[in-house]
Amino acid sequence: MAALVIYVRLHDGRYHGGGDWPPSPARLFQALVAGAGLSGPLEESDKEALRWLQALPAPIIAAPRALQPRRGVLFYMPNNDSDSIGGEPAKMAKIRTATKIFQPYLFDAEIPFVYAWPLAPDPADQQNAEKVCGVAERLYQLGRGIDMAWAWGEMLDDGRLEDFLVAYPGQIYRPSENGSGRMLPKACPGSLESLIFRFQAYRERFFYREEGKTVKVVFRQPPKPRFQLTPYDSPPSRQMYELCDPVEEGVFVPWPLERAHELVVALRDAAVSRLKVSMPARAADIDRVLVGRKPDGTNDCPPQDRVRIIPLSSIGHVHADREIRRVLVETPPGCLLHPNDVQWAFSGLDLIEPDGGEVLATLIRTDDKGFLTHYGAKDDCAYRLWRTVTPVVLPESSRRRRIDPVRKAQEAKAGSERRAEQDRAAAAVSQALRHVQIRQGAKAVRVQREPFEANGRRVEDFAKGTRFEKHRLWHVEIEFFAPVQGPLTIGDGRFLGLGVMAPVVQAGGIYAFTVESGLASAPEPEGLARALRRAVMARVQEQVQGPLPRFFSGHEADGSPARASHSSHLAFAFDPGRARFLVIAPHVLDRRPATHDEMANLAILDCALEGLRELRAGEAGILSLRPAPLIVEHDPLFAASREWITLTRYRVTRHVRAADARQALVSDIQTQLRLREFPDAEVTPTECKGIAGRGLEGVATLKFEVAVAGPVLLGRTRFLGGGIFVGQGTAAS
């Protein structure tokens, strides 16, 4: 199969078209018609090519990642009341009103928009596609009149198109036949004629009518063009099933994890048989979407349009046995079969023993999808760290070298060979992510044969009864640069129960950024912390609707400061010793687990901090930032230590009655340590003084009986960079 591909570049990296993103296929069709008719009436050959194009199905769209500012630019334009100024152009300013707000989408102008139509191998289609490529070269704008653009087209075979989309540095939008998602208009039969008629009507939209001695100008609205709405990026249809006892109601029948492949194949074949009996005319389509091949053995179904059968083992607790009790059936929006037909095919299936014919379990449909949260399939959650539940099948090129069991000593692998095998496997994992359209990029990949959890299984156990050699199977841990939503299955066995991954819920809550350049010689830590707080709040505001939660702002809904005894919002700090900024979550400050709401807010914070590379800090300068690795076990602000000294000045929270200022400082620090659930410490003040408008401040040393881990942020200004203590040596010292 071939594909017609049209590339469009916008000159300024801005798109002012309102109401649709990405620019819809209808926008492109209008732009092609406008370009073809720029020098006069449309040629008959151009009309023929455009009529052919409008009859094609909706194209695949690739668009650069874009940002739309929250605030637009207000434009003042004259209204239609020119009679009030006698039609004099010099007085036009008197009737200008604020009528339009432009909020353009901003993107990288070097990345083109791409529209791709898969075509059948028909010579007539080839000729018409070449004509459309000629029309595309006359395109001059896309969107509004100020969005200057140019375009070109080419023909690509199906394999080259998929390779291009995999490597495309933007977002891919695919049309959906059996779904509901982002609705975008596309051309349809009659669109070209409606645009021609609209153009003619637009030229005659004003006409004059005599009424007595006056002549009135009458406006007639041109008709709208004819387009058809098509859903893009519809979410897949998901249905959960439980493996239940065929006799006793409500009793699970657990299935061994290492036999996940056998379970999926048995359920798939039973569903195929049921569908072919009820829909014999669609046997080829059934084989395409469920088995992945046609009856003749060839495979022509795109992977993203195939039904996924995902075995879900019991996870979520350290003592979970990890046996399979549930199965998720996922029908993609581009599937040739309707989701209702697929769900019917699996509902009530009997899992029959191959030899004796005994019914082992029955597949019962359930509407309880809460278990999917363990596999990262909750709508509002995404995760950075993922681990395999069933191992990933990687390509033959990444297989391990087989060692003859009777020659283990002679054929033992050296460390360099093992390292090379793991490097090849890690590279293959990155390729497998591209094949499943995961574009966030892997920050780190870890591969091994052993399971990551205590009740898991080694990779060799999963190879029995499959067509995959055990040397191609790997347990994989992936840390992504950006959060990823589930369910996530990767590798060559992803349609056969292998390569199923689950997220590792992390509650780190510590973000570090190193200042690369732009910092003033003697910065004021609290001022820098305030600048960081403003920047983070502004970025979070782009992620949420309405007022910011207390977690980010430190204020209640009525605007008053948060007064809880325990930490309830983020702390922002500047570490002058290492020239870095820190954002620290409240559960880290209080040395406790994160709550459910805090975990949700941390996911928002992850997205908000993504791409933070510059900070405008007033007199301190315009700072260039980069994310900094933070190894808690060795970091002086977090590693366990018995002695801690002040890094940024401590400001007392309450002025208590005491013999002198030093005693008041000691008493306040000890109170703060108890509130943060630190053990008792010997506090030795080394400096203490009152400052007008700020209160009592000082410097002190803390000595604990045992080593304690940081961070140690105390005092009135601990949320804005004050009261930071740094450890003097590790626990071992």
Image (tube, rainbow, N blue to C red):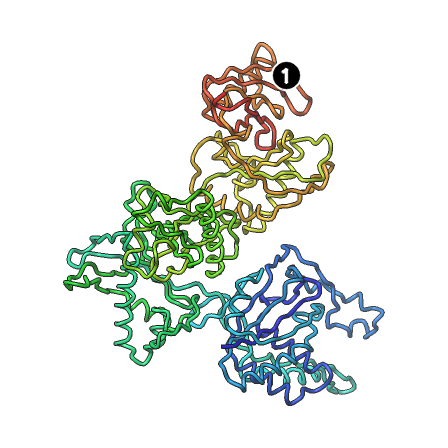
Given residues 492 and 433, the one toward you in this image is 492
Question: Is 133 displayed left or right of 278 in the figure?
Answer: right
Answer whether residue 221 is visible to the viewer in this image. Answer: no
Write down the quadrant of residue 354 in the picture. Answer: bottom left
Answer whether residue 73 is visible to the viewer in this image. Answer: yes
Residue 652 percent coordinates (x, y): 58, 22
Outermost top residue: 659
Given residues 114 and 380, the one toward you in this image is 114
Given residues 214 and 569, the one toward you in this image is 569
| Within-10-Å neighbours for mark 1: few <14, some 14–19, many 20+ | some
Answer above or below: position of 12 versus 37. above
Residue 677 percent coordinates (x, y): 45, 25
Label 1 amino acid? Cys
Answer above or below: position of 722 versus 202. above
Q: Is mark 1 on a helix, strand or loop?
A: strand
Residue 578 percent coordinates (x, y): 63, 32
Outermost right residue: 90
Residue under the point 66% across and 67% down:
9
Question: Is 333 displayed left or right of 439 in the figure?
Answer: left
Write down the quadrant of residue 89 in the picture. Answer: bottom right
Residue 29 percent coordinates (x, y): 61, 77
Answer above or below: position of 365 versus 211. above
Q: Name the residue under label 1.
A: 688
Outermost bottom residue: 44
How many numbered callouts? 1
Outermost front residue: 410
